[in-house]
Image (cartoon, rainbow, N blue to C red):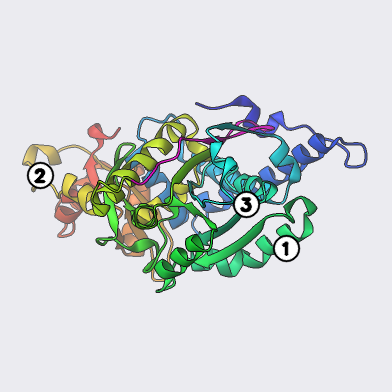
Amino acid sequence: MKTAALTPSALPDVEPDTATPREAYLARVAAMTARSREQADGARSQAPGGLPSHNYLLCSANRRNYLPDYPSTDAAFYEHVLRHRDWASLDEGEDLAYFLTRFTGDTSFLADVHQRPRVFCTFHLGSYRVIHHFLLRHQVRFTLVVDRATLEQQGEKFEQLRAQNPAFQGGEFRLLDAESPSIGRQMMREVKAGRSLLFYLDGNTGVGGMHRQDDKLALIPFLHGRIYARKGIAFLAHLTGTPIVPLVSFRHSADELETHFFPAIEPDQALPREQFAVDTTRHLFGLLEPTVRRYPEQWEGWLYMHHFADVHGLREQHPPLPSPAPEELTGPLAFHTARYGLFAHAEGPQLFDRLTYQTFGISDKLATLLQQLDSLPLEVHQRLAMAPLFRDLWSRQVLIPAARRS
């Protein structure tokens, strides 16, 4: 579902000296939107050659594998995802974003969160950093657990924002490196000291980074497929007896935001810890899924979910094809652009398979041939079908009969 009020044309042009705070905020959003569009245009067509970036193709693959029925072009979807990512970053330094947000759902934890800490679990959706404002304004002592890159790049920014805003002075905000080998012990110390924890569950960070697929991750259903999700957060909650408070943030329009708190999850000590961790992780992503389906472009995860996609399962679903029957080679061929894309790399052109996330290095000559195949005469197609490389291109469905192209 797309919301017209989120489009750039809905954001007014205003003079900063005469603008109301809301108008000034929307003007900054409009400027940010223009920058996001420029970045998206650059990723869609890079010089030289006009090929898209690898990141652009990865986002395309993520959407096609996990939300294949969503009606959007790759270009529009990528631009809108970048815009919402940048919008969330802008909102972090905007007091007005907090006041434009309705906080709904179960906030009963505020009654005793200062005596009994919570594990807050959220996602990179909508204006997801508004929760920082909420917790600090309610004088909640909490620790944000982030990946090392975020800690190094934005740790100082987080502290500056807290120090510069008088409304935050009653709260206490710390950062922990999710990739530290001792992160488990550090988090337990925080909880025992009465500090709540805040996690972005879809970052999938931790020791080993985002590329892990090990026994600390649970393979769970999500949208149209399966993903690997970290279960250590639920494991920690069970170990320490700390309630989990799930929440999601999203936009109804450019200046109407909502953060919704779901009922707290009390650790069930009657369940084995491993079972609780897996079941709870599945439940948490189940809470995210309806909002992602409703506002898919507001989820930043499209930019990196390939790191925790069930790639092995996808490759099993799309094995190589057998050799073609002779009658399949009588007509023209086509480059299967719905499945494959080309991108430039320092080592030469790369062929990317959206269905399996595989990348193959190819020659400049083959890259040019694939791009020009539609305009070449039939005899060139027939010679290509006799080339030694053809059977590999056919089995991987890089080349298909032109009549079958969607």
Quarter in which the C terminus is drawn: top left
Residue 173 point in image, percent of width and height: 63, 60
Residue situated in front as seen by the camera: 37 or 168: 168
Q: Is residue 100 visible?
A: yes
Which mark identifies residue 208? none
Single out the mark in the foreground, 3 or 1. Answer: 3
Tag count in the figure? 3
Q: Which residue is mark 3?
A: 140
Which mark identifies residue 160? 1
Residue situated in front as seen by the camera: 406 or 203: 203
**SS at mark 3 in the image:** loop
Few, some or many C-alpha atoms within 10 Å of disc 2 (few <14, some 14-19, many ≥20)? few
Q: Which residue is mark 2?
A: 324
* Residue type, numbered disc 1: Gln
- Sequence-wise first label, 3 or 1: 3
Query: Is residue 172 part of the magenta span, yes or no?
Result: no
Q: For the residues marked 2 and 3, what is the alpha-carbon distance in whole angstroms?
A: 65 Å
Residue 266 point in image, percent of width and height: 39, 43
Left or right placement of residue 250 versus residue 206 in this view: right
> Residue at (25%, 46%) from the top-left corner?
270
- Residue 84 in the image: above or below residue 115: above
* Residue type, numbered disc 2: Pro
- Sequence-wise first label, 2 or 1: 1
Residue 392 point in image, percent of width and height: 17, 55
* Residue type, numbered disc 3: Val
Segment colored magenta: 250-267
